[in-house]
Image (cartoon, rainbow, N blue to C red):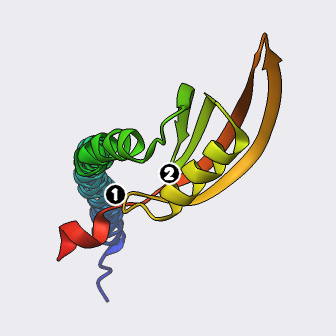
Amino acid sequence: MPSINLLPWREAERKKRQRDFGVATGGAVVAGIAVVMLTMLVYSQMISGQQSRNQRLTDEIVELEKSIEEIDDLERQKERMLARMEIIEQLQKSRPEIVHLFDEIVRQLPEGVYLTGMRQTGSRVEIRGVAQSSTRVSALMRRIDASDWMDDPEVERVETRQSGTSRQSEFVVYLKQKRSDSEEES
């Protein structure tokens, strides 16, 4: 029987398979590294895109906060202006009232009564003066009570003083000024 040596062929086949396995393993490693790198690149791009969107949102939020602050400032200015307008309107409405008050005081002042001072706080008016007698002070009180522009007279004090041969009564009277709001509204 002839002898055939198949060993070198097997050896060559084994080397070829080992080389093919090495190439396939190297290719798989390269392909794996490529897949990992490509995945990292994709995720990096996604993260970068999200960060740019987040930055844009942050910038927009800052702009909106500035706008909100400006709106709040404008609202405060508007409230201050409305308050000023309301005060001016109240002053305009009450402007003729002081004229009526002075006119009415002059009309209701009895003969022999002289005023030395007046002070108004809100609708309350303090009148200081000198009268020839305390009866003239009571006449002033009656006239104030009957007035259209004054109300609720109250005497704080009446002091009679001797000044030479004549006697004088110093007095302090409080009254309330009537408001004309009901007349203006109708």
Residue 171 in the figure: left or right of residue 53: right
Circle 1 residues within 10 Å: few <14, some 14–19, many ≥20? few
* Residue 62 locus on image (x, y percent): 30, 42
> What number is the disc on residue 36?
1
Locate residue 119: give its quadrant. top right
Which residue appears at 58% of the width and 37% of the height?
127
Label 2 CA crowd tier, 10 Å (few <14, some 14–19, many 20+): few
- Residue 102 image offset from top left, x and y in percent: 36, 38
Which residue corresponds to the image point at 37% horizontal and 60% vertical from the top-left? 179
Tag 1 secondary structure: helix
Q: Amino acid at mark 1?
A: Val
User: How many marks on residues?
Assistant: 2
Left of 36 or right of it: where is 127?
right
Depth order, front residue of 145/32: 145
- Give the residue at x 33% y 61%: 32
Q: Is residue 175 left or right of residue 48?
A: right
Q: Is residue 167 above or below residue 10?
A: above
Q: Nearer the viewer, residue 99 or 163?
A: 163
Would residue 68 be seen by someone viewing this image from the given angle? no
**Res. 161 in view:** yes
Residue at the image position 34 percent from the left and 42 percent from the top: 98
Residue bearing mark 2: 123
List x then y, in percent, for residue 52: 24, 46
Mark 1 or mark 2: whose residue is earlier in sequence = 1
Q: Amino acid at mark 2?
A: Ser
Pick the residue in front: 81 or 180.
180
Task: For the N terminus, give its image quadrant.
Answer: bottom left
133 up-or-down from 144: above or below: above
